[in-house]
Image (spheres, rainbow, N blue to C red):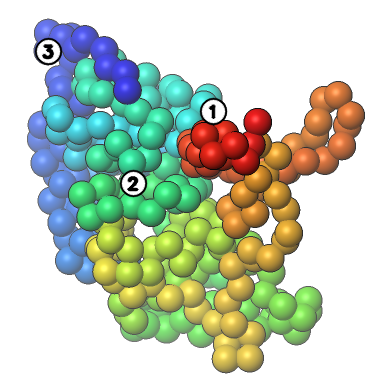
Amino acid sequence: MTSRRFSDQTYNFAFLDEGSKREIRRKTLKAIALPGHQVPFASRDLPIAKGYGTGGLQLTLAHLGRHDVLKVIDQGSDDSVNAVNIRRLVEHTAGIETTEDTALATLIQSRHRIPEEPLREDQLLILQTPKPEPLSRVEPREEVTRRQQASRDYSSMWLRLYEQIVRWGTITITMDYPVMVHDRYLMSPSPIPCQDTPKLHHAEHLTIFGAGREKKIYAVPPYTDVVPIQFEDYPFEADTERGYTCRWCGSSHTLMDEVIDEATGAKQHQCSDTNYCRKQRERGIAKGVLK
């Protein structure tokens, strides 16, 4: 774990002013009380561009405590530019400890992935969300989608799935698969891949979604029903049966990234979750299974 010295004379703790943090926490409580419902909030300007995770970062800054341990990942990686810059910003303005170990983190901010390692009740997952309204893919007018959400009218989304089956013979949505939360609201689970979607169902941890550009917060409390919409004869598929093996740890059950070997030019695969892959590899080496 790493931490930096923080000066109260330079920044308010966690950058945002206390009034802004209180407002975000109040809206988060409302979102938790209404699982899957999008709650508007007054999105603040931050020293990063909109579209780079301002919604998730505002939630992170508003919920941080001085004893929290933060982990930031982007597409499963702790070392991407987005993850490193957000982690440095929080370290500089809050001075809290940060880590790459999922098990040691109390607060995890993520872009497009849920960690492979199961999360606990004492951990909070915050997901950056570019498009909070799932119906916007079939209906661009927000006033209409708000009425549809209020009246639980999701026929246009069902029609989208039906049209894909007619055209392609299967549902072709591979990420951001629309889900029903607590049998009430249709929710976008952020652009996580379909393989991560089942991790939200009856999860032990609290998940909060933040969309800075759209100014929306929504949440999935622990042990809540999160069910992908599906037809009886065309069920939801998590796309896990590809038969790939990670070149580093040998895993075959995790989400893989395809990479090109610089020496041979051959396609290879490796775990998207770099921390999980590192742990698996260390265990394999300790057991003598890997070199």
| Residue 30 image point, x, y percent | 17, 60
| Residue receiving disc 3 | 8
In which quadrant is the N terminus drawn?
Answer: top left
Tell me the SS state at disc 1: loop
Q: Badge 2: few (under 14), some or many (20 or more) residues near its Cα, within 10 Å?
A: many
How far apart marks 2 and 3 lie (CA) works out to 25 Å
Tell me the SS state at disc 3: loop
Question: Label 2 sits on what residue type?
Answer: Ile
| Residue receiving disc 2 | 126
Res 71 visible: yes
| Residue receiving disc 1 | 80
| Residue 205 image point, x, y percent | 28, 56
Please give left or right for residue 130 compared with residue 17 in the image: right
The tag earlier along the polypeptide, 2 or 3, is 3
How far apart marks 1 and 2 lie (CA) works out to 17 Å
Residue at x 15% of width, y 56% of height? 29
259 relative to 174, above or below: above
**Frontmost residue, 202 versus 184:** 202
Q: Residue 101 lies in what quarter of the image?
A: top left
Question: Label 3 sits on what residue type?
Answer: Asp
Label 1 with label 2: CB-CB less than 8 Å: no
